[in-house]
Amino acid sequence: MMAASVAGQRGLRVVLIDHAQRLAEKIRISGGGRCNFTNIGTTPAQFISQNPHFCRSALAGYTPRDFIDLVERHGIAWHEKHRGQLFCDESSEAIIRMLERECDAGRVSWRMPCPVRAIAREADHFSVKADGESIEARQVVMATGGMAIPQLGATDFALKVARQFGLKVVEPRPALVPLTFDAEHWKPFSALSGVSLEVSVRCGQGRSKTMFLEDLLFTHRGLSGPAILQISSYWNPGEPIELDLAPGRDLAEALLGAKPGNRQQLDTALSAIWPKRLAEQWLATAPGRPGALRMADIPDKTLRALAERIHGWSLTPSGTAGYRKAEVMRGGVDTRGLDQKTMQAKAVPGLYFVGEAVDVTGWLGGYNFQWAWASGVACGRALQAA
């Protein structure tokens, strides 16, 4: 809709084809139904790609402030949550209606629901076979998203089209997704489902090591919450992640300082900084099970070892919760085959790819929407009139 509205308002004749029954379902469900539509802190640093500089031009050409201006022109009230995340005050439906009105202003024609059966290149134009109709177009824009949340109609259609025309694809995988663990390994922690706390999470080695300070959520199958969703985009199968369950504290110093004459049990002392269920369960799995011991009776060495384990809990996920639970897809059309200013395939004039279909994946917090708006606008501005 972003690419279509910009092109249409430039005077181009645009047909928007969508196979879905309902328009913009991912916008509708985002942000708990209030659409985290951008992040005011957006820079290229919040995006993952094999070609990390690719997103710079589009993001510079259409900024969060530009989208905020559009939102305000349509009278949509919004507010900022933490870390620059912007949400609608009311329903995400307001963003969908806004994009519809922008398309109407560009006299965009709609075909919906309308599955596309085939796209072929014929001389100087493309032939699009769409639900019994054949549409000829000088230019085709693939804005069909990624594979996350297939229950809403997400598919790999853009990747199939890219491969059809000889473009390379960076292997896709779920991102911003919960991490899961072997059932037997996770059994001691499954009872903590629903427990949440702020953590520091890390993965990778050396200069490629990545860290986030966010909330973590225990689930029956593993870990979720913003911290895990963020790190999942960087995690590779077989690699461990490392959690600091008491970030910003020197837990060893705190425990040793509280020890002299302290008749409290250790699990009670830890409950002062953790949810009680976590303190009890964590200590039940600790070597020597020190939870029921009085602080004053625990050797300093044991307290130091416990603090070290809490600050550096290393564990290896068995996998992810998959595309059904992922917020986005990582990977996509290889950006080295696209023009960064226009989103056009270098080897296939007239064929464009934007948004999540491209190998540009943002962090949690409105960044992926900003990439959708920015790449759509870059493409809409670049399309040529007949």
Image (cartoon, rainbow, N blue to C red):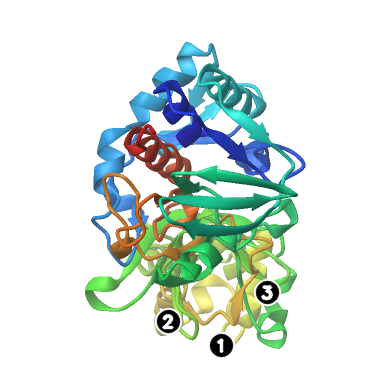
Residue 246, compared with residue 18, is above or below; it is: below
Residue drawn where x is 57% and y is 69% of the image: 266
Q: From the image, which quarter does the C terminus lie in?
A: top left
Q: CA distance from mark 1 to mark 3?
A: 15 Å
Taking the spot 43% from the left edge, 37% from the top edge, the residue there is 373
Quadrant (top left, top right, bottom left, bottom right) of the N terminus? top right
Q: Position of residue 194 (x, y in %)?
A: 70, 57
Which label belongs to residue 189?
Answer: 3
Residue at 66% across / 59% down in the picture? 276
Secondary structure found at label 1: loop
Task: Name the secondary structure under disc 2.
Answer: helix
Type of the residue with mark 3: Phe
Look at the numbered discs 2 and 1 and tell me whether their residues touch, using CB distance below 8 Å. Answer: yes
Return the x and y of residue 201 as percentages of the image width and height. 43, 65
Q: Which residue type carries mark 2?
A: Ala
For the residues labelled 3 and 2, the Cα–Cα distance comes to 20 Å
> Between disc 2 and disc 1, whose residue precedes?
1
Residue under pointer 2: 305
Decide which of 64, 243 is in the foreground and name it. 64
Q: Which of 265 and 9 lies nearest the eye of the viewer? A: 9
* Residue in front for this viewpoint, 154 or 163: 163
